[in-house]
Amino acid sequence: MRRLGGERQRLAVFVGAAVVAAVLTALLVRTGFPPGDDGRPTSPLRAGRAAVGWGFTHTQFSADHGDEAATGRAARLLSASPMPQNQHIMGWGAGNPEPSPGRYDFSDLDRRTAWIRRTGGTPVLTLCCAPDWMKGGASGHTDWGALEKAPDPAHYADFAALAGKIARRYPDVRHFVVWNEFKGFFDEKKGRWDYEGYTRLYNLVYRELKKANEGNQVGGPYLVMDSDTGTGGDASAPRGPWGSVDRRVLDALAYWNRHKAGADFVVVDGSSYSKDDRYAPGPFAATRKFADVGRWVRKETGLPLWWAEWYVEVPDAHDDRNGWSERERLAVQAAGLMEMASGGATSGLYWNPEGEGAACPGCLWSSTELAEGGRELPMGELLSRFSRAFPPGVRPSHVAVTGAGRTAVRALAGDRTVLVVNTTDRRRTATVGGEGVTLGGYEVRWLDRP
């Protein structure tokens, strides 16, 4: 959400769209998409639905780079249980795609999308951020400190053209998110978001992507659902024991919703804690925000809901989230996932915080920069299981929890399994859907449904 991607430039690479389409189609057949019922390889080329399910976002360091044994281990891990994988077009592992007008460098994007294909994931591209020359910088130069600046209005059409070129280059990608968190779109003079500017950019990109392929699925506005712990203010805003959402965010969402050229899904992100880093009334109870906000957004837009990012642990001054034990972190993350699904979300993309070192709180796998890396971590197992248990089309349902530990234990059922979480640090016993269960402190467990 707040991490930047300082990557190097590469030599310009450009291949005609028609040639690339043919090459990619061949690659899809040869490199790992399992066969469908008709014997043909399944792939996003044949799955242009708005919902993609639960997966993750690649950041600057990811499993496509590092020690060969570690990257191979990570590839096997992801291939065994494919999930949606999201990549930004500039930053967070990808270099500048158009360093100067008409001169392209897709080498990093090529590498990341090839990795997604290799591991059988459903690819998602987030169309952020913009080359320097589109935002007042020098042509041919990349200032990574200016990554989060929005393009100048005079270059909105140029950014849309770049989005269209990228869509044509990767014909197997069917899901696109327009921009990231309204970065660069806050109007300091008015003290609010420049939702008019963002919507203009969004509409140009939307039309260009649909022109590239009518089957492309496009969503926005990727707003951060900031909240205050107080419950005063506008009664029409989503609210709960956790607080209420910032009115400026809701105004931006409402404007985009009224003036958008179209959308196949709506995208938000946010944290369970407030803007001043407080939980109300506590870390587990605060995750109810995801359900309350989700229901409100679904009602307002009528669109399938994606959470592009979500956070349950307050970061430190360095934007690290490492104050909890992994057991507690996993339990609160499980509660957050349950609330997002309960609120009607069909898709979510976990911001994977992989780094270069051995310590990696909340990571999906251990760092592939290390020889012993690429091994599944607790959050990776949770997300993978959740992705399989609650795919698009499966409607989650709450399960009756009774007994002495009923106030401490949460449960959510899919078609075949039940996710159960102990929200306390002590041993608890409860009856979940008629089955007696004893859970250790902060234990997360999966039960088979009869």
Image (cartoon, rainbow, N blue to C red):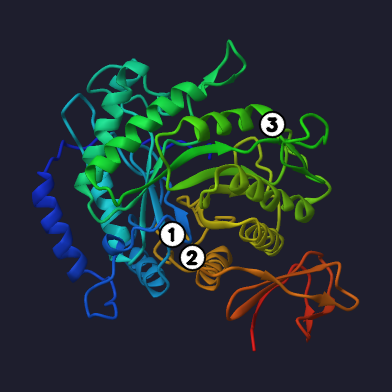
Judging depth in this view, the residue of 7 and 401 nearest the camera is 401
- How far apart are the alpha carbons under marks 3 and 1? 28 Å
- How far apart are the alpha carbons under marks 3 and 2? 30 Å
Q: What numbered label is drawn on residue 246?
A: 3
As drawn, is 252 to the left or to the right of 201?
right
Residue 132, percent across and down?
A: 32, 23
Specify the farthest residue to the bottom: 450
User: Does the image show residue 381?
Assistant: yes
User: Does the image show residue 107?
Assistant: no
Q: Which residue is mark 2?
A: 392
Judging depth in this view, the residue of 301 and 330 nearest the camera is 301
Q: Is disc 1 in contact with disc 2, using a CB cutoff of under 8 Å?
A: yes
The quadrant in which the C terminus is found is bottom right
Q: Which residue is mark 1?
A: 52
- How far apart are the alpha carbons under marks 1 and 2? 7 Å
Mark closer to the chain start, 3 or 2? 3
Mark closer to the chain start, 1 or 2? 1
Which amino acid lies under the numbered mark 1 shown in the image of this protein? Val
Which amino acid lies under the numbered mark 3 shown in the image of this protein? Asp
Judging depth in this view, the residue of 298 and 89 nearest the camera is 298
Residue 47, percent across and down?
A: 33, 62
Q: Is residue 260 above or below residue 314?
A: above
Mark 2: secondary structure: loop
Circle 3 crowding by C-alpha within 10 Å: few under 14, some 14–19, many from 20: some
Asked where in the image residue 228 lies, by quadrant, the reply is top right
